[in-house]
Image: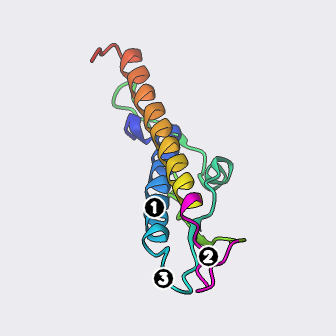
Amino acid sequence: MGLLDMPVFTALTDKMRWHQARQGLLAENVANADNPGYKGRDLKQYNFEERFSQVQPPTVTTAATQPKHFSTSLGGAAGFADQRMVNFEITPKGNGVTLEDEMMKVTTNMMDYQAATSLYQKSVKILKTALGKTA
């Protein structure tokens, strides 16, 4: 197992993928804001606890090649489920997308993605420092 396959990195990677998928759905909502009868969609909220409950704890076994070597194995990744949004404001054409709400969601999603990316980068720097590599 590589260092970037650690549970914290896989969880952050999944979180960033979730934000990318959500950004796509929000962009569809904005693009279809004027289509009659269009109902907006959004992803089910990402939950770290749910993510870690699906991951099996790593198993560590020693290898006989050198005393300081070891390996681990991790479980698979979870998928994302989309859901219809609950809209309180419906236009006369039957469209349930409010551009102001969608733009707020896009901005919030972008900031959360940037936070996850920053946390990922800082974690990699910490590992490099712990390994004695500077860069």
Res 90 seen here:
yes
Q: Identify which amino acid the numbered label 3 is placed on.
A: Asn
Whether residue 121 is situated above or below residue 19 in the rendered picture: above
| Marked residue nearer the N-terminal end (1 or 3) | 1
Residue drawn 58% across the image and 86% down it: 93
Q: Which residues are magenta?
A: 89-100
CA gap, disc 3 and disc 2? 10 Å
- Residue 93 part of the magenta segment: yes
Q: Nearer the viewer, mark 2 or mark 1?
A: 2
Q: Main secondary structure of the magenta part?
A: loop
* Dots 3, 2 in contact, CB < 8 A: no
User: Secondary structure under badge 3?
Assistant: loop
Q: Quadrant of the N terminus?
A: top left
- List the single residue furthest toward the front: 92
- Of residue 96 and residue 28, the one placed in the foreground of this image is 96
- Which residue does the numbered mark 1 point to in the structure image? 21
Give how far across and how far down residue 58 sits, in percent. 55, 43
Q: Identify which amino acid the numbered label 2 is placed on.
A: Gly
- Which residue does the numbered mark 2 point to in the structure image? 96
Whether residue 85 is situated above or below residue 78 in the rendered picture: below
